[in-house]
């Protein structure tokens, strides 16, 4: 771990634990490095002094497993709000409740003329449960701090001891806006652990679903931003195209959000006979609507110019690609090798650049989907998984960035697993971007980054 | 020139209004308002730990295909303005207090609608240490709309049933 940290170009992707070890995942260019360190006397050396992005992970590891990060930057609780009937639910010996503070202590500013603005966890709009605490002077945000964990459902504990196929139901419900991407990363991790590969037809159909989900997700976020900015024509246009895609997904895969369709070993069901035609129709409609969508986006871009700048950070995914970083997990994926994936790059790093990247990605996905549908291989769509032991890592590119899943199987059952959503890295970056901007930009910055709650709350 | 077009003689003084006609018109207007304008519900969404699936489908209700507002159904920002609390997600221990605060803040008469399998009974998360169960574990539920997630068409059918029931007395219905 020390060797990886010594080289400055490595970015922290994730940090999690099991009962005896703490694991970290790094990226150096296109190389992925995994490192593990043993937990001794309930402690492990903290990563947060060298990589500030590790702080949230360290708080989560402490709440779930009880391992303390020695020398960490922040030891406040994160997921545990003092409401569970136990503490450290994933440790071999969970403790008695009553450690965490609620309401939590926030690192707010107590100066003359500074007001505290609490947002959430229950919101006026149709939203996920998150809490944002702003310290503002007039219209300017001086400090922003997020608090999550409200939607903690105990997913990791529910997955333990289950077969990968059974556990996939929980993985599909980590974050519905990225249900295909999470299920895909998890399936790949399970397949890597068991040393098997999904059949070519399943791999191609998985790529189809991933791209459909990406377009629908980008359209939903654009519609939400349009709604927040009062741009009714963009809201209506994006909502219409998204609905057509979801209806086509329903026709093809039997579920509008394609939940539970990607499973370890392949896909759960063959595409419907008229599914390909239904998707093609929706894509044709979208292709016709794209110039209009682009035109209606202009007022939003003008509004977002210079808002929420995130540059020079470790971020991958959408936020990274809006700030000149090219990493995209699809570049590692053989199913995309034929396309010569053009990762769309912008450089400004503001909310407007993120919207332009989204629009470009919609066009890219459209082009890839048409080729994928034209060249669907024949054959089976699923293989049986052996009940063996092993450890594996898998990834998939969701609408907001790369999702990593790790799991360890013990005779075909999950001994330990962790789903790492890009949101872990995005929230701290968004906090920094919100700080020093006006209060009225907070919603736009949040939506432009597709910040999740449930995906991190586990 | 323009002044000439508007020039007219002094208006005659108006006679008294017929009280009987006024009363009968007012009664007819009242009845019409009850049937047309009374058919409206203000909905406040409360997320008690959802995976975001029900939220995606709830947002779809606002697109041009379903156009929720044409039925007199609209989402409002504050529970104090709401007739209906629409709850999604399994009830997590970390959000129970927030749900109860929203329920307390909603004026009577109020309806609680549990949307999605998780809000009905905890769904796949039933039995977790972090989850209390469905919405009913904390507040009384009037209507359940099942599905994981329920489709917008199903959501709309459930909410319209609530609208119909709202103009008649009596509570406690199930849309699926």
Image (tube, grey):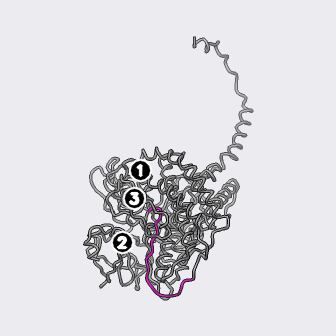
Labelled disc at residue A31: 2
Measure the C-alpha gap from mark 2 to mark 1: 30 Å
Q: Nearer the viewer, mark 2 or mark 1?
A: 2
Q: Position of residue A317 (x, y in %)?
A: 41, 62
Front tag of 3 and 2: 2
Dot 1 corresponds to which residue? A352
In the rendered structure, the residue with mark 1 lies on which chain?
A: A
Q: Quadrant of the C terminus of chain B?
A: bottom right
| N-terminal-most mark, 1 or 3 | 3
Residue B174 visible in this rendered orientation of the protein: no
Q: Chain of mark 2?
A: A
Discs 1 and 3 carry the same chain letter: yes
| Disc number for residue A321 | 3
Task: Give the magenta-colored segment's residue range.
Answer: A384-400
Rendering coords of residue A315 (x, y %)? 36, 63
Q: Is residue A44 visible?
A: yes
Quadrant for residue A248, please give it: bottom right
- Disc 3 and disc 2 in contact, CB within 8 angstroms: no
């Amino acid at each position: 771990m020390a060797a990886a940290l010594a080289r400055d170009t490595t970015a922290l992707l994730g940090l999690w634990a099991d009962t005896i070890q703490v694991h970290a995942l790094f990226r150096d260019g296109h190389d992925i490095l995994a490192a593990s360190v043993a937990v001794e006397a309930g402690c492990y050396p903290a990563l947060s002094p060298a990589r500030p992005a590790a702080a949230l992970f360290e708080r989560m590891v402490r709440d779930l497993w009880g391992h303390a990060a020695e020398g960490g930057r922040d030891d406040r609780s994160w997921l545990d709000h003092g409401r569970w009937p136990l503490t450290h639910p994933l440790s071999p010996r969970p403790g008695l409740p009553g450690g965490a503070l609620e309401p939590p202590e926030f690192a707010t500013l107590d100066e003359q003329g500074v007001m505290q603005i609490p947002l959430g966890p229950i919101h006026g709009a149709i939203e996920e449960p998150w809490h944002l605490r702003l310290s503002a002077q007039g219209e300017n945000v001086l400090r922003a701090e997020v608090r999550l964990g409200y939607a903690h459902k105990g997913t990791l504990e529910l997955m333990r001891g289950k077969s990968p196929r059974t556990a996939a139901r929980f993985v599909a419900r980590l974050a519905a806006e990225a249900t295909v991407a999470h299920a895909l990363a998890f399936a790949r991790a399970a397949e890597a652990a068991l040393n098997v590969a999904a059949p070519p037809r399943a791999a191609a159909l998985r790529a189809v679903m991933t791209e459909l989900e990406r377009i629908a997700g980008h359209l939903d976020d654009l519609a939400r931003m349009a709604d927040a900015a009062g741009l009714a024509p963009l809201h209506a246009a994006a909502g219409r195209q998204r609905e057509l895609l979801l209806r086509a997904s329903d026709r093809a895969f039997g579920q509008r959000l394609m939940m539970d369709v990607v499973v370890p070993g392949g896909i759960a069901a063959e595409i419907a006979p008229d599914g390909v035609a239904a998707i093609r129709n929706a894509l044709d409609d979208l292709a016709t609507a794209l110039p209009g969508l682009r035109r209606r986006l202009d007022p939003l871009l003008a509004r977002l110019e210079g808002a929420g700048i995130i540059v020079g950070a470790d971020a991958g995914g959408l936020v990274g690609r809006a700030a000149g970083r090219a990493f995209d997990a699809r570049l590692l994926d053989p199913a995309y090798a034929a396309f010569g994936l053009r990762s769309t790059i912008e450089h400004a790093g503001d909310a407007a650049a993120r919207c332009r990247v989204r629009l470009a990605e919609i066009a890219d996905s459209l082009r890839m989907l048409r080729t994928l549908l034209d060249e669907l291989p024949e054959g089976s769509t699923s293989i049986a998984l052996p009940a063996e032991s092993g450890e594996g890592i898998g990834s998939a590119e969701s609408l907001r960035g790369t999702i990593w899943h790790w799991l360890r199987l013990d005779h075909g059952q999950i001994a330990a697993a962790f789903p790492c959503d890009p949101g872990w890295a995005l929230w701290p970056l968004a906090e920094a971007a919100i700080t020093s901007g006006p209060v009225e930009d907070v919603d736009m910055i949040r939506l432009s980054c597709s910040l999740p709650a449930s995906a991190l709350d586990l | 020139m323009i002044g000439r077009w508007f020039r007219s003689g002094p208006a005659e003084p108006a006679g008294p209004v017929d009280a009987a006609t006024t009363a009968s018109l007012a009664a007819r207007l009242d009845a019409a308002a009850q049937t047309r304008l009374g058919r409206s519900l203000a909905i406040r969404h409360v997320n008690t730990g959802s995976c975001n699936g029900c939220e995606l489908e709830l947002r779809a209700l606002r697109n041009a295909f379903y156009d929720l507002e044409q039925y007199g159904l609209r989402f409002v920002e504050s529970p104090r303005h709401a007739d209906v609390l629409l709850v999604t997600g399994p009830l997590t221990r970390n959000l129970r207090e927030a749900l109860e605060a929203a329920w307390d803040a909603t004026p009577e008469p109020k309806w609680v609608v549990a949307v999605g399998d998780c809000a009905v009974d905890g769904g796949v998360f039933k039995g977790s240490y972090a989850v209390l169960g469905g919405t009913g574990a904390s507040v009384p539920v009037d209507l359940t709309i099942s599905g994981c997630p329920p489709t917008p068409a199903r959501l709309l059918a459930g909410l319209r049933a609530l609208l119909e029931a709202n103009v008649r007395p009596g509570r406690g219905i199930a849309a699926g």
